[in-house]
Every structure is written in structure tokens, then in C-alpha cells.
Image: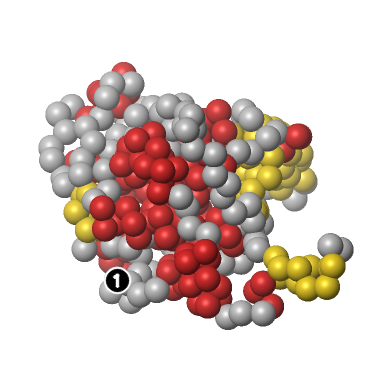
């Protein structure tokens, strides 16, 4: 479902805020004048997301609509700050609207909503080191290079719905990111997938091992993901029915991103298929989701049937 504002016409922040100092041609970033925490306080008091627009978002995006009122208010504040600190642009002249920015930003911030306690600045640091989100109207083509076993470099192209660059932008196809779209089946979400990569990259490389909150045990995370990824690869190579999107078998980084999508969009399926991954992601994201059995979950996934959705339980 696409968000249409029929009665509300209010603008959102469109990127890192600037202030005029001495004329229309000279600007200095507000970040150079105020500490980050004070900027946050200012933005939340003066330029928060309007409540009517936020209510329309909750109706359009089920992941946001299922939050309780307290968590919804926290996410609204976090999303407001994210919109001030990040810049959205459209590829090839594509017009990016307030609604598009809000849909993307709110779901990105859902990942960090409870990853840590304390002020928003602590959580937004999980998305530090980059600024831009680029929206394409549809799937897009990127060129890449690969080195073979003989050291020869081959160039090729790929058709993508999303891509996250280390220390660079997030690229998204709006046609596959808009509310109600799950182009790779129930339980998939291209926004969550690409921003999960951004969390993973906070260690300097995308390898399925993001920085962990202090409440977590690195050895348990590694053991759980190594075992689950090995099992998934075995199923993939044997032609067995798969509980997750086959793309999860591309690398440990993709396995983490696909499991993140499933944790939020179809937690019962992840719980049924890889219980320890479900527990580790619950600890990482700071929330639990009700885990109920899924009957014949692999057959449901293979045939494109509906996966059950569950309500959130926050730590």
C-alpha cells in the first residue's frame, strides 16, 4: 500500500541541516555549531515528524503499526533524527517524496530502536560513517569486478533491488521497497535487508558478525550462525526444501541479512527453522517476538503461501 496524503501537506527534513550565517550563498552545517545531542534536542522540539503523517505511516506499514504507543513514539523520535542526519536522493531524476523517505527511514530505525538503551544518539551511532540513501524507481543494474582462481579480473553486471556500500550509500528500488511489496516472498523486506548490512559493516566488513551489545556473548553468536549457515548450505547444495530465501546461502553476510528480514517479518518461521538464530537476533535487536509452531513451514515457503505474523515483545 502506498501512503497518500490527502489531507496533510507537511514537509519532512530532507538531509543534514544547515543554517545561514551571512547571506544566501554562505551556509555552515549546524553540526559545526552544536554537539550532536543538543542538535537532537533542537530537532525534536522544533521539527519532529507531524503526528498525522506518522499515523498514516502506521496504517500503511504493518511492522510500524503493530508497535505499542510507547515504542511508536520512540521510533518517531528516532526516525526524525535519522531524517535530519541522512540525505535522500533519486537516481536518474527520480522524484523522492516525503512519504518515501518516511517509509525507508522508519524501517531502518526499527532495527536500532532497542539495540541499546539511553538517548537516541547512542542508537544512531549504529548508522554512523555514511550519509546517503539513493532511491531508484525500479530494479537497477550495477557493474562489478571479480577475480578468478588464476588472478584474472572479470567484469559483469547485476540486476538488483538493493545494495549497501561500505562507508557509502544505501541503494534501494522503490518498486520493491514500497509498503505491501514482498517481491521475494512472504517474510522478505529489502529495506531491512540492506540496513542489516549497514549494521554488519560497523565492524569494517560485511561478514555476518556485527558489533554486539555488551549483553551478548560473541562465542555464542558465532557458534549459532556458523552452525545454521552450514546447515543452510547443505540443504541448498542437496536440493532440500529451504526455510529461507535461497539468497541466504550466498555468504555469511547475506545469511545474517536474510535472517534479519525473517526475524521481523516472519519470526515464527525463523523460530521453527533456526531456534538459536531466533534467540541471538532477539538479544541483538533488544526484543522478543512470540514464537509459535509453523506447520510444514518449508512447503509453505516453497509454494509462496502466507507465513504467520507475530506481535512484538520488547525486552
- For this view, does 223 lie left or right of residue 83? left
Using the rendered image of the protein, determine whether residue 205 is visible from the camera's viewpoint.
no
Residue plotted at (37% across, 42% down): 55
For label 1, count other residues whose C-alpha is less than 10 Å away and answer few (under 14), some (14-19) or many (20+).
Answer: few
Q: Which residue is mark 1?
A: 216
- For this view, does 115 lie left or right of residue 15? left
- Location of the C terminus (image quadrant): bottom left
Residue 118, percent from left and from top: 35, 75
Residue 21, percent from left and from top: 78, 73
Residue 115, percent from left and from top: 35, 65
Is 19 situated above or below 264? below
Question: What scheme was used to colour the molecule?
Answer: secondary structure
Mark 1 residue element: loop
Image quarter of residue 111: bottom left
Of residues 267 and 154, the one nearer the viewer is: 267
Using the rendered image of the protein, determine whether residue 212 is visible from the camera's viewpoint.
yes
Of residues 155 and 259, the one nearer the viewer is: 259
- Location of the N terminus (image quadrant): top left
Residue furthest to the front in view is 7
- For this view, does 214 lie left or right of residue 200? left
Residue 187, percent from left and from top: 34, 35
Residue furthest to the top in view is 303
Residue plotted at (43% across, 69% down): 120
How many circles with numbers are drawn on the protein? 1
Residue plotted at (49% across, 38% down): 8
Residue plotted at (48% across, 58% down): 48
Amino acid at each position: 500500500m502506498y501512503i497518500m496524503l490527502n489531507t496533510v501537506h507537511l514537509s519532512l527534513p530532507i538531509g543534514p541541516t544547515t543554517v545561514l550565517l551571512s547571506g544566501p550563498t554562505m551556509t555552515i552545517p549546524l553540526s559545526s555549531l552544536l554537539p550532536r545531542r543538543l542538535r537532537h534536542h533542537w530537532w525534536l522540539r522544533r521539527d519532529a515528524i507531524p503526528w498525522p503523517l506518522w499515523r498514516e505511516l502506521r496504517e500503511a506499514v504493518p511492522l510500524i503499526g503493530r508497535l505499542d504507543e510507547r515504542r511508536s513514539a520512540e521510533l518517531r523520535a528516532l526516525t526524525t533524527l535519522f531524517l535530519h542526519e541522512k540525505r535522500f536522493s533519486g537516481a536518474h531524476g527520480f522524484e523522492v517524496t516525503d512519504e518515501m523517505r518516511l517509509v525507508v527511514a522508519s524501517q531502518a530505525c526499527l532495527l536500532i530502536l532497542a539495540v541499546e538503551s539511553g538517548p537516541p544518539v547512542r542508537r544512531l551511532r549504529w548508522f554512523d560513517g555514511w550519509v546517503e540513501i539513493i532511491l531508484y524507481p525500479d530494479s537497477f543494474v550495477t557493474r562489478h569486478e571479480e577475480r578468478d582462481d588464476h588472478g584474472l579480473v572479470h567484469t559483469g553486471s547485476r540486476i538488483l533491488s538493493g545494495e549497501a556500500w561500505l562507508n557509502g550509500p544505501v541503494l534501494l528500488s522503490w518498486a520493491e521497497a514500497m509498503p505491501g511489496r514482498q517481491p521475494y516472498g512472504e517474510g522478505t523486506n529489502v529495506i531491512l535487508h540492506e540496513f542489516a548490512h549497514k549494521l554488519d559493516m560497523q565492524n569494517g566488513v560485511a561478514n555476518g558478525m556485527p558489533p554486539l551489545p555488551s549483553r551478548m556473548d560473541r562465542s555464542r553468536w558465532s557458534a549459532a550462525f556458523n552452525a545454521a549457515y552450514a546447515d543452510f548450505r547443505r540443504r541448498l547444495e542437496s536440493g532440500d526444501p529451504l526455510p529461507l530465501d535461497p539468497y541466504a546461502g550466498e555468504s555469511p553476510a547475506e545469511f545474517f541479512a536474510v535472517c534479519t528480514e525473517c526475524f521481523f517479518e516472519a519470526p515464527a518461521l525463523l523460530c521453527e527453522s533456526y531456534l538459536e538464530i531466533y534467540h541471538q537476533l532477539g538479544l541483538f535487536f533488544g526484543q522478543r517476538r512470540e514464537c509459535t509452531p509453523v506447520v510444514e513451514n518449508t512447503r509453505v515457503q516453497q509454494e509462496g503461501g502466507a507465513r504467520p505474523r507475530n506481535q512484538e515483545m520488547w525486552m
